[in-house]
Image: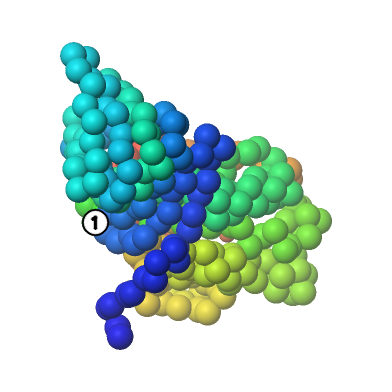
């Protein structure tokens, strides 16, 4: 049934095990919120940390087992159906599992993405791509940083922002299938070589489709589409292209122009922005380019 998901006992979107007998399983996620089942083996210590974001909430409900919670002044024993919340915490709080404990956790900030094996494996591929392709590293990280800044300026919703941030890091993973000689070729590409390059958005989307971050696939697939239909792989135009992909297109082009490549020196940031402005409306989304220009001005990078 559309919009309805049943999960059977012991079946999870993804499980991550930590060596100290802690296990986290993702049950559901949406709109930046994650529902996680956590198990801790008997006798083990675990803790909750202050969050970077003071407004984020972590909620824990004990399904089975018993824990001791160590507060400044007292030690409390908590058991099944007891629960605790973490919001605006200043110092870590430590717990000891008296028996094997299972907790149901609700996090309002994406947490699982940072420990996900799927995402780590894909990020590892991003690094390999950068080794093959780039004269300097960190292209993907910078594209993600620019994209998030633009998204905040444009007031994108939380879910869009989170997906954009991960998609931006992974946008070029499909290049892992393109030979290094083609990626770093200084001169004009032959038609065959360009055909190989044109496959990377689709290949990247395919690699993500197998993970539970499937919704990133269309964003990755569309990052080389251009408003007037001149992009690849599908020649989509205008609103057919996702806003997230239009944002990555701007960040990606800017970063590609302002970094040294094997075959040329970096362009000045002002020059790169002028180029984006020249192509705003035809290749790039005007609003996205304007938002980015504002950011660069605020950061004193252009005049
Ligand atoms: Fe790309
Ligand atoms: Fe790129």
Check disc 1 and report the residue beneath it: 157
Considering the image in quadrants, where does the C terminus appear? top left
Q: Nearer the viewer, residue 165 or 72?
A: 72
Quarter residue 283 falls in: bottom left
Whole-percent x and y of residue 50? Answer: 29, 28
Query: Residue 107: x and y, percent?
Result: 28, 47
Instruction: Say left or right for 70 vs 272.
Output: left
Image quadrant in which you'd find residue 300: top left
Residue at 36%, 33% (x, y): give it: 98
Vertical placement of residue 145 versus 196, above or below:
above
Residue at the farthest top position: 73
Observer able to see residue 199: yes
SS at circle 1: loop
For this view, does 48 lie left or right of residue 195?
left
State the residue at coordinates (51%, 74%).
Answer: 230
User: At which x and y percent is residue 2?
Assistant: 30, 83
Image quarter for ligand 1? bottom right
Which of these two is toward me, 272 or 162? 162
Q: Nearer the viewer, residue 272 or 7?
A: 7
């Amino acid at each position: 049934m559309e919009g309805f998901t049943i999960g059977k006992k012991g079946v999870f979107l993804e499980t991550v095990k930590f060596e100290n007998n802690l296990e986290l399983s993702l049950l559901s996620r949406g709109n930046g919120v994650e529902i996680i089942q956590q198990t801790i083996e008997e006798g083990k210590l675990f803790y909750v940390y202050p969050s970077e974001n003071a407004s984020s909430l972590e909620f824990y409900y004990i399904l089975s087992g018993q824990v001791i919670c160590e507060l400044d002044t007292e030690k409390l024993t908590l058991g099944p159906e007891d629960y605790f919340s973490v919001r605006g915490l200043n110092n870590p709080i430590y717990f000891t599992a008296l028996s094997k404990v299972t907790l149901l956790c609700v996090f309002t900030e994406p947490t699982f993405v940072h420990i996900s094996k799927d995402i780590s494996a894909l990020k590892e591929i991003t690094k390999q791509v950068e080794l093959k392709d780039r004269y300097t590293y960190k292209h993907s990280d910078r594209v993600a940083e620019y994209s998030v800044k633009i998204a905040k300026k444009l007031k994108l919703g939380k879910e869009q922002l989170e997906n954009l941030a991960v998609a931006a890091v992974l946008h070029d993973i499909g290049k892992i299938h393109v030979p290094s000689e083609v990626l770093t070729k200084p001169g004009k590409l032959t038609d065959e070589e360009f055909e190989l390059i044109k496959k990377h958005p689709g290949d990247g989307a395919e690699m993500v489709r197998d993970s539970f971050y499937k919704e990133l696939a269309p964003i990755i697939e569309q990052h080389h589409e251009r408003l007037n239909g001149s992009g690849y792989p599908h020649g989509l135009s205008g609103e057919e292209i996702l806003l997230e992909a239009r944002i990555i297109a701007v960040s990606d082009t800017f970063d590609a122009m302002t970094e040294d490549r094997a075959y040329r020196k970096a362009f000045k940031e002002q020059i790169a922005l002028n180029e984006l402005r020249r192509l705003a409306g035809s290749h790039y989304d005007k609003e996205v380019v304007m938002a980015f220009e504002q950011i660069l001005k605020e950061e004193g990078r252009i005049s």
